[in-house]
Amino acid sequence: MLHLFKTAALMLLLSSFVSSLQAGQALRVGLPTPGQVPYFWQEADGEVRGIYADTLRAIAADLQLPLEFIELSQARLIRHFIAGEIDIEVGVSTHRGELARLEELSLFSRPFGIVNEVIIYNPELEFPAFILKDLKGKSVATVRGAVVPGYINRQDFASELQIATRVHRGWSQVGLMREASAVHYNTKAGKKYKISLPYESNSIRLRLHRDRVELLKQIDLSISRLSAAGELENIICKYLCAD
């Protein structure tokens, strides 16, 4: 009986030791490449910038957790997450369909923001562009791989910056992109176009690997504190508000 008690006590101590080691480990953050301005990108000098990067830094600072950013393509990021080599993916919408194994290993934080999808268009556009149905049969610049209705005549490009540039220069009359990108390129990069009201909105969260489940409640509480203090809003304004 005494032997069993000692064994159980040893296992409990070992479990506690492993948990404490995990708590002190750097959170390995998947940094998708190519970067996505203004959300998450790496400068030539190695600095990681963007709304998502700064939001994660604020949470990590609040919880006194070190971060390690790891550059990966989106496909490799998912594979590394499933293999337990990435702890966190930032800016995830839970509405998208995913691999069953990825779903099994994923825990999601409370929302820390919203991603709005908008229409950008030339100010001299001769037809209205307020909702997607206004674009039926029209040629529309879209990001390659983005999901759009079949009634739109899509013209695919590699990035939202390309779309913003084309509409600004009049090469495309209309484009679809995320609101934060549209505002960033309009206010920070001098691209001129009109921006519609959102036609779709999705809340975004942190995806945490199930191996780091002990951090989920702390992360949720940190998001609540930072939101209440206005810190998350300040981060967004840093990248989107006019100078």
Image: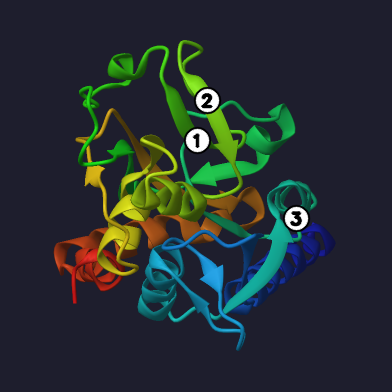
| Rendered location of residue 7, percent (x, y) | 80, 63
Q: Secondary structure at mark 1?
A: strand
How many residues crowd mark 3 within 10 Å: few (<14), some (14–19), many (20+)?
some
The amino acid at mark 2 is: Arg
Disc 2 to disc 3: CB gap under 8 Å = no
The amino acid at mark 1 is: Thr
Q: Which of pointers 2 and 1 lies earlier in the amino acid sequence?
A: 1
The one of 107 and 184 positioned closer to us in this rendering: 184
- Report the residue that reaches farthest toward the right: 3
The amino acid at mark 3 is: Gly
| Rendered location of residue 213, percent (x, y) | 56, 53
In the displayed structure, 150 sits above or below 211; it is above
How many residues crowd mark 1 within 10 Å: few (<14), some (14–19), many (20+)?
many
The one of 233 and 224 positioned closer to us in this rendering: 233
The residue that disc 2 covers is 154
The one of 192 and 31 positioned closer to us in this rendering: 192
Disc 1 to disc 3: CB gap under 8 Å = no
The one of 80 and 110 positioned closer to us in this rendering: 80
Tell me the distance, in whole angstroms, between the alpha carbons under discs 2 and 1. 6 Å
